[in-house]
Each structure stands twice: as C-alpha cells, then as structure tokens.
Image (spheres, helix red, strand yellow):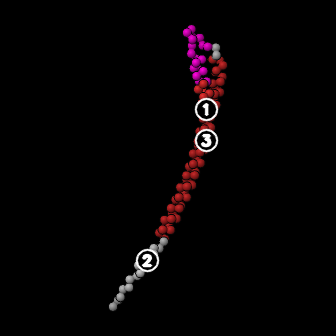
C-alpha cells in the first residue's frame, strides 16, 4: 500500500512537472509537493522497520543455530567417548597352549 502511494505521488509529480507548449507549469503542482515528502518519509520509515525486523530475525536464527551446533558437538563427543571406552566381547574362547 505504501509502495503504491509512493508510485502514485511520483507519477503525479512527474505529470505536474511537464510544461505546456508555452513553458508554463500547471497550477496543481503546489498541492502535490507537500504530500510527496510525507509519503517518501513514511516509505523510508517502513523500510527501516523492515530492516530492523530482518536483523532481529537473523540474530535469533544465528543464536538458535549456535545452540543446535553446540548440542550436536557435545552429543558427538559423548558418543565417540562411549565407543572408545566400550570393551568388545570375545567371540572365541581362549586357546589353551600346552607347555611340555
């Protein structure tokens, strides 16, 4: 909606800036000038709000990603530690060696 307003006001300002064949400006230009800066300010304010929302969302996503990576790292470490300390069961019975 705000983008449409900016486009409409810009179009009106461009149309109003056209000169007629004698080089005179149409009288309607004085009405458009006060509205255009307000519309532009509102548009830039909306862009700033959107940028702030994106930055906040990015920081939340990075925080969550770092937490998940830390959990995965600690899980991998505990799993590898458990695998190295596990004793493998013997599959064969010990051989008896006779000494003479």
Q: Earlier in the sequence, mark 1 or mark 3?
A: 1
Measure how far apart labels 2 and 3 are at the Cα level.
Answer: 61 Å
What residue is drawn where x is 57% and y is 11%?
A: 20
Label disc, if present, on residue 53 of the rendered structure: 3
Residue 12, by quadrant, is top right
What residue is drawn where x is 60% and y is 17%?
A: 16
Residue lying at the far top in this picture: please name it.
22
Check disc 2 and report the residue beneath it.
90
Check disc 1 and report the residue beneath it.
44
Q: Earlier in the sequence, mark 2 or mark 3?
A: 3
Report the magenta residues as a range: 9-26
> Residue 58 in the image: x percent, y percent?
57, 45
Query: Is the Cβ of the residue at disc 1 closer than 8 Å to that at disc 3?
Result: no
CA neighbours of label 1 inside 10 A, class few (<14), some (14 to 19), many (20+): few
Measure how far apart labels 2 and 1 are at the Cα level.
Answer: 74 Å
Measure how far apart labels 1 and 3 are at the Cα level.
Answer: 14 Å
Residue 25 in magenta stretch: yes
Q: How many marks?
A: 3
- SS at mark 2 in the image: loop
**Frontmost residue, 95 versus 53:** 95
> Residue 87 in the image: x percent, y percent?
47, 73
- SS at mark 3 in the image: helix
> Residue 55 in the image: x percent, y percent?
58, 43
> Residue 71 in the image: x percent, y percent?
55, 58
Quarter occupied by the C terminus: bottom left
What residue is drawn where x is 66% and y is 19%?
A: 31
Q: Is residue 63 above or below residue 87?
A: above
CA neighbours of label 3 inside 10 A, class few (<14), some (14 to 19), many (20+): few
CA neighbours of label 2 inside 10 A, class few (<14), some (14 to 19), many (20+): few
- Whether residue 69 sits left or right of residue 28 in the image: it is left
Query: Is the Cβ of the residue at disc 2 closer than 8 Å to that at disc 1?
Result: no
Q: Is residue 73 above or below residue 34?
A: below
């Amino acid at each position: 909606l705000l983008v449409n307003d900016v486009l409409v006001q810009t179009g009106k300002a461009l149309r109003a800036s056209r000169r007629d064949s004698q080089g005179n400006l149409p009288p309607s230009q004085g009405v458009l000038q006060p509205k255009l800066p307000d519309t532009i300010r509102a548009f830039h304010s909306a862009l700033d709000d959107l940028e702030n929302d994106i930055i906040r969302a990015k920081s939340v996503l990075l925080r969550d990603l770092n937490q998940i990576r830390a959990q995965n790292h600690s899980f991998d470490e505990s799993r590898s530690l458990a695998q190295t300390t596990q004793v493998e069961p013997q599959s064969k019975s010990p051989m008896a060696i006779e000494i003479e």
